[in-house]
Image (spheres, grey):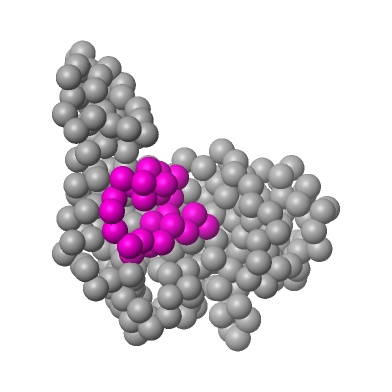
Amino acid sequence: MRLIIDIGNTNTKIAVMRKNSFLTVERHKEVTVEALARLLAQYPVTSAIYSSVRAGGEAACAEWLGGRVKKLIHFTHKTAIPVKNLYGTPETLGCDRLAAAVGAYTLFPAMNCMIIDCGTAITIDFVGQGGEFLGGNISPGLQTRFNALHTATGKLPLGQVTETPQAMGTSTDTAIEAGVLQGARYEIEGYIEQNALSNVIFTGGDALFFAKHIKSSIFVVFNLILIGLNKVIDYNAYYL
């Protein structure tokens, strides 16, 4: 069994997998030794991988975990992967974006894929049909946009995601909601229109919101990064 740890900007996902099947997926604010110890007591984990987009914070857990599994991988841009990384500055590439690319290639090999990760940031990344990570774009996520309007102005209230945003605001609250939500929607629809031949994959915490409001043929894969990290364990069996 494998322990997969994805430390994101806001939350951490911890999963236990048997080959390609999820046995459990947990969401935490932080990764803790207590959470890892509980999972290892429940499941006979032999290998683990962890990926983090935060600066530090995981070192103590990694040290603890290293003495309790046979194989531990710290996923970085230097880790061997089944995708060719064509990013110009690989050392600055978020490992979550790279893991998602591996996940997309795992699920949809030999297809051009556009990965739309809707979280703290919205990332639009492209994987070529030959298994190449081509790069992509980054813009603020929904809550980040709401926060920016609230903190950068003197009087605008803090908006929030609503399932049925108005097309046009009729109050300051609804104007903020419509501006942020409809604006992000139009942004993503523009990418989909410009890349009509790509297989579109949504992931991230706000994936369902966009999936409900965008009329396109898309796939929603919430655990895309975890799938990619699991694939990395298999791939590195040949290198360790």
Quadrant of residue 184 within the rendered picture:
top left
Q: The magenta stretch spans which residues?
A: 200-223
Apparent side of residue 235 relative to residue 40 in the rendered image (left or right): left
The image quadrant where one finds the C terminus is bottom right
Q: Is residue 154 left or right of residue 235?
A: left
The residue nearer to you, when weighing 219 against 236, is 219
Q: Quadrant of residue 108?
A: bottom left
Residue at position x 31%, y 24% in the image: 159
Q: Residue at x 36, y 46 (%)?
A: 212
Residue displayed at 62% across by 60% down: 4
> Can residue 94 be seen from the camera position used here?
no
Find out whether residue 96 is within the magenta segment: no
Q: Residue at x 71, y 68 (%)?
A: 18
Q: Is residue 201 magenta?
A: yes
Height in image: 91 above or below 234? above
The image shows residue 24 at horizontal and vertical percentages of 68, 54
Residue 211: % across, % down: 36, 50
Vertical arrangement, residue 233 with respect to residue 183, above or below: below
Judge left or right: residue 177 versus residue 17: left
Residue 172, percent across and down?
A: 20, 17
Task: Tally the numbered discs.
Answer: 0
Quarter of the view holding residue 235: bottom right
